Amino acid sequence: MVRFHSSEIGVSQGSVMLVTDYDTGGPLWTGSGERVTRQSVVFPERFLAPPAVQVAPSMWDIDGSTNQRGDLGVENVTSAGFDLVFKTWGDSRVARMRVQWTAIGALPDDQDFLL
């Protein structure tokens, strides 16, 4: 449970084209075994503290002739941003993936700048 002690709550949203390995011949499309890709996301405005971040694939292009395995999540969430992380393994082949994200958290107000 996250409790907000600020009178201002912010919601920030965005979209990231996380995987383009089909176009570039990258490892998520051409490789096998454990593979990972990550991308840093910077919020347009800082939160007071690290917000709650939720992510979901909004588009994926995955080879249908292999197993479709994936693990999508976030790491290193701060008040300024987070790392978007996608992992796959085995014979899965991921050509493209776009990810939507939403961050919800307390925003700084005038009182926070006086501290």
Image: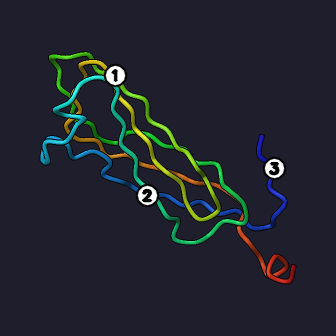
Number of marks in the image? 3
Contact, mark 2 vs mark 1 (Cβ under 8 Å): no
Q: Position of residue 26 (x, y in %)?
A: 19, 42
Q: Amino acid at mark 1?
A: Arg
Q: Amino acid at mark 3?
A: Arg
Q: Is residue 56 left or right of residue 31?
A: right
Q: Earlier in the sequence, mark 2 or mark 3?
A: 3
Q: Earlier in the sequence, mark 1 or mark 3?
A: 3
Q: Is residue 12 above or below residue 20?
A: below
Within-10-Å neighbours for mark 3: few <14, some 14–19, many 20+: few
Image quadrant occupied by the N terminus: top right
Q: On the image, numbered disc 1 is attached to which residue?
A: 69
Q: On the image, numbered disc 2 is attached to which residue?
A: 14
- Residue nearest the observer in this picture, 90 or 98: 90
- Residue nearest the observer in this picture, 31 or 95: 31
Q: Nearer the viewer, mark 2 or mark 1?
A: 1
Q: On the image, numbered disc 3 is attached to which residue?
A: 3
- Residue nearest the observer in this picture, 21 or 109: 21
Q: How far apart are the alpha carbons under marks 2 and 1?
A: 24 Å
Task: Give me the residue at 87% from left, 79% from top.
Answer: 115
User: Which secondary structure, mark 2?
Assistant: strand
Q: How far apart are the alpha carbons under marks 1 and 3?
A: 34 Å
Q: Is residue 52 left or right of residue 72?
A: right
Q: Position of residue 4 (x, y in %)?
A: 80, 55
Q: Amino acid at mark 2?
A: Gly
Q: Position of residue 91 (x, y in %)?
A: 23, 19
Q: Position of residue 60 (x, y in %)?
A: 27, 36
